[in-house]
Image (cartoon, rainbow, N blue to C red):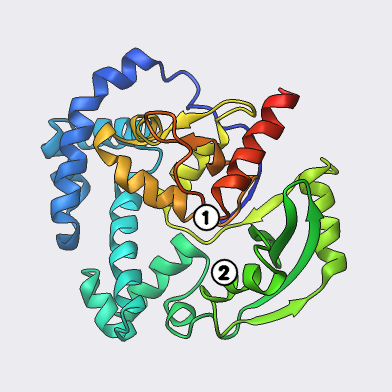
Amino acid sequence: MTATIVKFSPEAGYRLDEASRDYPRIAAALAFLGERWRDQPDLEAAARAAGLSPHHFQRVFTRWVGVSPKRYSGALAHDAARAAIDDGASVLDAAFEAGLSGPGRLHDLFIAHEAATPGDARRRGAGLSFTWGAAPSPFGTAVLLIAPRGLSSLGFADPDVETGFEDFRRRWPAATFTRDDGAARDWAARIFAGDGPVPLALYGTPWQRQVWRALLAIPPGATTSYRAIAEQVCTPKASRAVGAAVGANPVSWLIPCHRVLASDGRLTGYHWGVARKRAMLAWEAARA
């Protein structure tokens, strides 16, 4: 996924009353696809579960969920395949775990959803090349991971630079990493001083990216809750899944997971430390 940080807004013309009206049918379709995705149900079957014609269902589902029914089912299959690979399964076994006909289909799935092939995941990044480096930031030393198409990860050195880098290396331990602190400083200037747009090259599932887009809608100086994000992207019952997607956010600060609090207003956990989360919120509030 390649993107540039922009303010997220709902689809033009899709009013809240329309979204509320569509919710019961979409909830039925989501439940159907969640239970039957391994059978690769076609559009007609999913539309019947929602009580709509295929054409109308395709349009309503895509407006409400943000991705097409086919892409949503693909995301579920991708998650299952990635989990199987992470558990040590072969590419062939992962394909069957995801309900696919063979490794070729799995290859297409990873290209579409993660910008990396199943082999890349299986080999833990062998063949992938990243530039990384450390640079000063308002919140201590930042550690940046840069892919050819944009910023892939942003974290912080706590307690030291190598510890921060290890968080990136764990995901792609066999990838090639070249340290370039000069490049990291250039990127940090763009990020923290506003010296130009910041293209992102994210590796994540459509569900994760949908949650990350919702985080971008939280303005500086404001906060929200996991439940509120869940209500925005799916259903209040998805708070736990939203929490997992927020925790998987690879680009701190720019994708502002620090603005998400517990429902009672507690800061709760933050991958880079609750003290840093508190400092980020205070820094933003003072400037808002």
The residue carrying pointer 2 sits among few (fewer than 14), some (14 to 19) or many (20 or more) residues within 10 Å by Cα, namely some
Kind of residue at disc 2: Asp
In depth, the one of 112 and 172 nearer the eye is: 172
Q: Is 185 located above or below residue 242 in the figure?
A: below
Which residue is at the far top?
17
The residue drawn where x is 57% and y is 69% is 167
- Residue with the mark numbered 2: 167
From this viewpoint, is residue 229 visible? yes
Q: Where is residue 48 in the image (x, y as percent from the top left)?
A: 11, 38
Q: In this view, does 175 lie to the left or right of 24?
A: right
Q: Which residue is pictured at 51% across the width and 49% down the height?
A: 270
Dot placed on the residue nearer the N-terminal end, 1 or 2: 2
**Residue located 28% across and 62% down the image:** 77
What's the residue type where badge 1 is placed? Answer: His
Asked which secondary structure carries label 1, the reply is: loop
Point out the image quarter for the N terminus. Answer: bottom right
| Residue nearer the viewer, 63 or 114 | 114
| Residue position marked by numbered label 1 in the rendering | 271
Q: In this view, does 122 lie above or below 36?
A: below
38 in relation to 241, above or below: below
The residue depicted at 33 percent of the width and 83 percent of the height is 91
- 3D distance between C-alphas at marks 1 and 2: 10 Å
Image x and y of residue 111, in percent = 47, 67
- The answer to whether marks 1 and 2 mark residues whose Cβ atoms lie closer than 8 Å is yes
> Based on the displayed image, in which of its 4 quarters is residue 106 positioned?
bottom left
**Which quadrant: the C terminus?**
top right
Q: In which quarter of the image is residue 262?
A: top left
